[in-house]
Image (cartoon, rainbow, N blue to C red):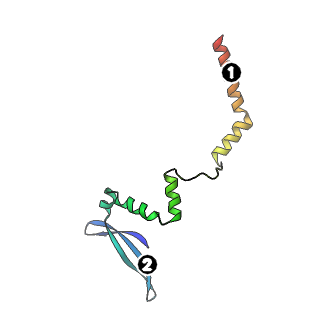
Amino acid sequence: MFFRRKKSGGHAYLQIVENRWDKGKVRQRVIATLGRFDELLASDQLDRLLASGSRFSEKLAVLWAHQKATAPVLRRVSIGPDLLFRRLWRDLGVGEVIEEVVDSAEILAVI
């Protein structure tokens, strides 16, 4: 099953459709027409419908939890730019240089 946006009479409608085999060919059958697409979007009914349906899917529940920032963090792995720049910072001693400059600036400010 899947959602389909079907244009008819100058409007677009949202439908739930299923594919099925009939005499060796794939046929589509409309399960339900949910209403005019523009009205569903304007009224937030589409978002509520999808959120309600996501309760029955473990994969979507994880995505919703991540979006709401309620998913537990099990492990964090640094990759890409974060890892590269952290290593450069450490290996080049950038932190120590900044501390020395700040310390010498504080001494000059006192004098």
The residue sitting at 73% across, 33% down in the picture is 93
Please identify the quarter of the rendering in which residue 16 is found. bottom left
Q: Residue furthest left?
A: 9
User: Residue 38: horizontal and vertical position, in percent?
Assistant: 31, 60
Q: Amino acid at mark 2?
A: Asn
Q: Amino acid at mark 1?
A: Asp
The residue sitting at 37% across, 75% down in the picture is 31
The residue sitting at 74% across, 37% down in the picture is 91
- Mark found first going from the N terminus, 1 or 2: 2
Pointer 2 residue: 19
Q: Residue furthest bottom?
A: 23
Depth order, front residue of 11/30 = 30
Judge the density around disc 2: few (<14), some (14-19), many (≥20) Cα neighbours within 10 Å.
few
Compared to 110, does 36 lie above or below?
Answer: below
SS for tag 2?
strand
The residue sitting at 49% across, 53% down in the picture is 67
Pointer 1 residue: 103
Locate the C terminus by quadrant: top right
Please identify the quarter of the rendering in which residue 34 is found. bottom left
Locate the N terminus by quadrant: bottom left
Judge the density around disc 1: few (<14), some (14-19), many (≥20) Cα neighbours within 10 Å.
few
Depth order, front residue of 40/86 = 40
Compared to 1, does 21 lie above or below?
Answer: below
